[in-house]
Amino acid sequence: MFSLDHPQKSPLFDYYAPLGTHYRGLLSIPHSGENIPKEFEAYLSGDLRAYKEDVDYKVNELVDIKALQSAGIAVLVAHVHRVCVDLNRAESNCVLFWKNNTQGKQLVVKDPTPAEVEKFIEIYHRPYFEIMKSALQDLEKRKSGKVSMVDLHSMPSKPTEYHMKQNPNQKMHRPDFCVSDRKGKTATPEFIQFFQQSLISKGHEASLNDPYVGGYVTEYVDQFRTNNIQIEINRSVYMDETTKELVPEKVAHLRPTLTEVLIKGFETFDS
């Protein structure tokens, strides 16, 4: 049924189609992009180090995409940096939303006009959700029950002052993973608990809806007939948060574990 062994590439994202005859679900990775399109440069500070602070650094490299494809899971990976257009935010506040990064470093030095904002939304935000919508509608036609969807992110190992303002009651210690479903709104208890317990069984600490409850992608996908969760990976599990580089030994341990958990989850809830 599916024969693409390579991604459908665009400047905005890569779409890796499922291989074989099964189509089990969709994995979205919206925040690992590091591309700053030239038309955004006039609005930004040019501080590359500041840009890198909040990117979900190399999250797309923390899973075996070919293995996911072979298991019938489509993978959607964004290229454009969230400082330009944040795909985990609604159209109303997605363009150049991050005036400063979560460490307080200035990112945006000039605001675009309303016409420019609309242009950026049309070019950089809508296409990601159009392909997501198409994939989910296709899955709904193929499945008798709920469609499985996971939105994959990473989080700082400790909350910054910005994070504490957003959620004053959160703990300073963060688990290896945070699995969320908008506090029970977007997935059945069995679905989200399967992923949480699978991660725990691999020796990781995994929380539910704390410190994150899911973002705009999770909210958007809920309009479809889905079991739909967000997974946040603690960056200390796979990278050096000071140098902003991957730690190869940690990645080598995490990648097969996370890939296995995802595949088993999608297989278990394949309707």
Image: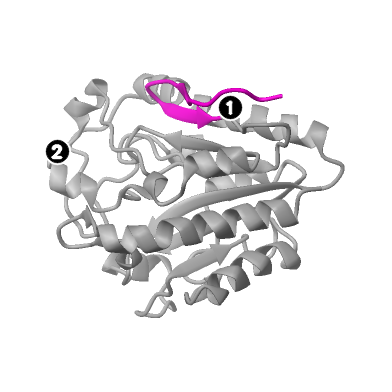
Left or right, residue 17 beside residue 147: left
Residue 76 is labelled as none
Given the image, on which type of amino acid does mark 1 rest?
Ile
Nearer the observer, 15 or 5: 5
**Stretch of the chain drawn in magenta:** 1-16
Q: Is residue 247 visible?
A: yes
At x 49%, y 64%, the residue is 212
Give the vertical position of 89 relative to 170 (above or below). above
Residue, disc 2: 45
Q: Is residue 221 left or right of residue 45?
A: right
Q: Amino acid at mark 2?
A: Ser
Crowding at mark 1 (Cα within 10 Å: few <14, some 14-19, many 20+): some
* Residue 217 place in picture, x, y as percent: 55, 45
According to the picture, the residue beneath numbered tag 1 turns out to be: 131
Q: Is residue 7 magenta?
A: yes
**Quarter occupied by the N terminus:** top right
Q: Judge from the rendering whether residue 128 lies leftward or rightward of residue 133; answer left or right.
A: left
Asked whether residue 89 appears in the rendered view, the answer is no
Viewer-nearest residue: 96 or 34:
34
Pinpoint residue 121: horizontal percent, then vertical percent: 44, 26
Distance from the alpha carbon under mark 2 to that under mark 1: 31 Å
Q: Is residue 59 above or below residue 103?
A: above
* Residue at image location 28% in from the left, 68% down from the top: 160
Residue at coordinates 62% horizontally, 33% vertically from top-left? 18
Q: Are marks 2 and 1 in contact (CB under 8 Å)?
A: no
